[in-house]
Image (cartoon, coloured by chain):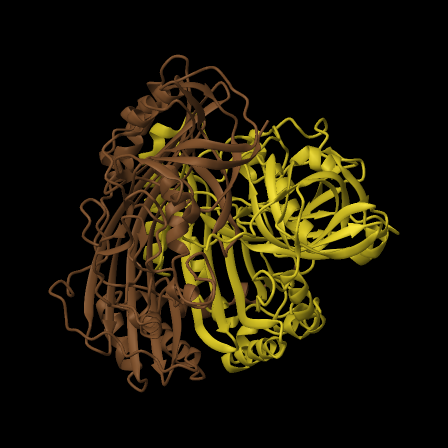
Chain colours: A brown, B yellow
Amino acid sequence: MRTAPAMRAAPATRTALDEQRAPAARSPQELALTALRLAADCDDCVAIAEDSSTVHVRWAADSLTTNGAARSRRFTVVCVRGPSAGVASHSGALDDSSLEDLVARAKQAARGDCAEPAESLITGSAAEDWALPPAESDAGVLARFAAKAGAAIERAGSPRSSLSGYAEQQVSTTYLASSSGLLLRHEQPRGLLDLVATRAGASAWRGVGTACVADLDVGSLRAQLDQQLGWTSRRAELWPGKYEVLLAPAAVADLMLQLYQAAGAGEAAGGQGPFSRSGGGALLGQRLSPAALTLRSDPAEPGLECAPVLLTRASTDRTSVLDNGLPLRPTSWITDGVLTALVQTRRTARLTGQHPSAEIANLVLEGGGDAALAELIARTERALLVTSVWYLRDVDPQRLLVTGLTRDGGYLVEHGEVVARLPDFRFNESPVELLGRVSEVGRSEPTLPREWGEHVTRVAMPALRVRDFDVSAVSR
Amino acid sequence: MRRAVDPSFLALPLEPLAHAALTRAGELGARDASFRILRTRTGRLRLRDGVVEAASDSVDIGLGVRLVYDGTWGYAAAAELTTEAAAGAARQAVEVAIACRPLRRAPVTLAEEATCPRTSWVSPYDIDPFDVPETERAALLAGWSHRLLNSSAVEHVLALFTAVRENRFYADAAGAAVIQQRVRVHPMVTAFGRAVGGEPASLRTAGPPTGRGWEYLGGAGWDFDAELAELPEQLAAKSRARPVRPGSYDLVIDASNLWLTIHETVGHATELDRALGHEASYAGTTFVTPDGPGTLRFGAPLMNVTADRTTEHGLATIGVDDEGVAAQSWELVRDGVLIGLQTDRRTAALAGASRSTGCSFAESAEYPPLARMPNVCLRPAAGGPDVAGLISGVEDGIYLAGANSWSIDPRREHFQFTAQRCHRIRSGRLDGQLSGVAYQGETTGFWGGLAALGGPATYGLFGADLCGKGQPVQVAAASHGCPAAVFSGVRVERVGGERRS
């Protein structure tokens, strides 16, 4: 290491500080409109400003480990020149100079060597709420939640279990402005809580997505976990093989989100992924399940509301920055067991002759069942019960074959009752092929996926009964 | 080779902001206050079949204050770089600590650390990737793509490039003030084969992310030219691969695959915060217990593993960590026995250690620092054989190269890994590629089966630049150096292959 010359440059830094004190921070709307002006020499421009405030707390073995409060600002500019779109983004406060630099970098990233012409931007006008300021989070939510969680820890039952968990509360306000006239605002509250209770080598997990974590009854959730820990003290052995399994809604959520991530139309059209047809094209119209399963997304889904227009800061296989502002309509990806839609950009929709069906930030699986998981257990002769899954990774993207493990709660069910706790086991399964082996569908309910829980909190899933589930290895 | 800190970062009011935050924290009665400003610039390029599909350039900057108030942590971050925001973050961190007090059982204590000198540190690289015009970066990747597409074995090519320049400023109430800059790059090319008379296959370059600059793509530290030349033929052979027969095999694992196994089974398993249960709700715990060092047999006597934040071009290499602890190098496993763990100042204090190993790290100012993995490396055998020599000693086995899929249980015990290429070994010679190979094991049993280590010629410094841990999830990067090695009697499953339609 060596001494930093700049550490002695105090006069210069004082000048910079004084300059930053003077002007009030510019609003997200002002920044967005300024960016459009700075990019007036481009063919098109999109500016996205996202203002978020987040509080979080985490504890383990009944004691605090980390916490935090953060106010973040992220600003993204998409510049379109000819057939190419360049994206630049900045997280943190932006002054005029930084904004000019940001737009310049977006222009530089728009190289203009793409083979396909760029899609024209979505057109529109100013929304009524455009001028409203960013939403503020409730400053007291952390204290109210911690008080409840602390009390829940104190009220441990007997025998005593240990509680670990994480709670997060966030509100994000996104502003979208485009050179095609769009001025849109979306406000998204988000809360999540996950809890793990452990006792005598056994563990149980519960995750909840919510509008406000301070409203959750942590004591009740802990009681549910303690009840699960008390299901059985017996342990059973397990061997690799094919089994009937009951997948709890949280486990189904992780698997269906894996499927949703692989449902890009462009990939399928290119012959890649589980929804590509041998010889070319996508599997649209193909029956995936004998059960009348419907997998759908709807921005207005009660309790799972999300942005009604596409808001994306980066182009991927499944989404395009040029589609920003695209109205999102209820979309059924799988209808009564048949694949009916894939995630489309306008470009892939044009190339494949389909309607645009952009990614929506919620997911619901339904199958007409009305039974809760407990009722499925009650009518089970013999099956493995999986409450949560973990560490899902692709092993064969062409089939969407994934490997993963059970975690914090695998059980043996016999004659309608949970009779033993199972060791964690590894499975190699395809969420797509698994749908073909669904023999019973429970009642769809809001849940939090374990693996995807920090990214996707708006899902509703049923418990599923699946035959011939592939147990590949068992932890001893 | 070493360059200077970016002047635009030095021009920020680093010390005045630190002074405002730390003074306010002191006035409020907080102790152990520290202040950070982090700025990270990330450039990404994605080309499909040689055409730019996405290009982005992002900057993330902010400040954060961590302190202990009434024995309780508090952390707060702000986007604005003003004295008002810095002092406000200190006040908010105290409010967070007060709010979270009901969840605190024992007061937070930190391992003692001598005051860090006022220093700066810059990682070694020749060419800042952000000094290279976007057009030039894209042109190089397009050239690589077209070179592959000229082969009849290749139908599509996906080329990705990531460049990161990270600036960090750390100051604390004890008087530390440290400015640091790190650069890393990661080019990755995947070729998709024509499935004529075989299974559709893809093959990815093994060139790892590295703490180097743009010179890396020109051959400094990795021979991309040679790798691209070999790739079409290897891809064609992969599309003709025979399905593996499940069973127990001796494996020769190339460094390009073994690094990830080390990351998951040794690196994460020896994090003390996991051993203390701090990651129970998300990333998971470990089978290693806090009292494991000195007693736990981790693997065969051949196994010697070091941890450090000092390896040249290592992804976790840095001068000082996010708690003001200078970079160190230490042993994790000696002659097969666990002798060390990874700590930050809090976990070091909980374990009764005299000092942190310097593993505190935060992805950005938005997040509080966590204990994160350093570079974790397996020592090669001095004078050991090359890969061909290792293969020649195996009668009936499989040679695996290039990392692919990985999955491990929350206690870091039971795992499954796959590879980019899997070759049958018969009588000491390679005999065609195999498909569907997934090796499974239990960590100490697997390392106990370590039968031979390759020499320095087989050694490579690989690594991960997207390792997630903590809640909120934070991403960190760490390098793993290792030789090729032979493992006896490893269980191999067959995964994938058949299509449903």
Q: Is residue B121 visible?
A: yes
Q: Compared with residue B36, is residue A3 higher up or lower down, i.e. above or below?
A: below
Q: Quadrant of residue A31?
A: bottom left
Q: Is residue B213 left or right of residue B110?
A: right
- Report how many numbered discs are placed on residues in the image: 0
Along the line of sight, the residue nearer the viewer: B435 or B34: B435
Q: Is residue A94 visible?
A: no
Q: Quadrant of residue A290?
A: top left
Along the line of sight, the residue nearer the viewer: A394 or A333: A333
Residue in the image at 63% along x and 66% along y: B212
Q: What is the x, y in percent for residue A393?
A: 51, 48
Q: Compared with residue A16, is residue B441 higher up or lower down, i.e. above or below?
A: above
Along the line of sight, the residue nearer the viewer: A171 or B493: B493
Q: What is the x, y in percent for residue A101?
A: 39, 76
Q: Is residue A330 left or right of residue B333?
A: left
Q: Is residue B107 left or right of residue A364?
A: right
As drawn, the residue found furthest toward the left would be A128
As drawn, the residue found furthest toward the top would be A158
Q: Compared with residue B99, is residue B55 higher up or lower down, i.e. above or below?
A: below
Residue in the image at 48% along x and 53% along y: B363
Q: What is the x, y in percent for residue A8?
A: 54, 65
Along the line of sight, the residue nearer the viewer: B3 or A399: A399
Q: What is the x, y in percent for residue A446?
A: 27, 39
Residue in the image at 50% along x and 79% along y: B134
Quadrant for the N terminus of chain B, please: bottom right
As drawn, the residue found furthest toward the right would be B383
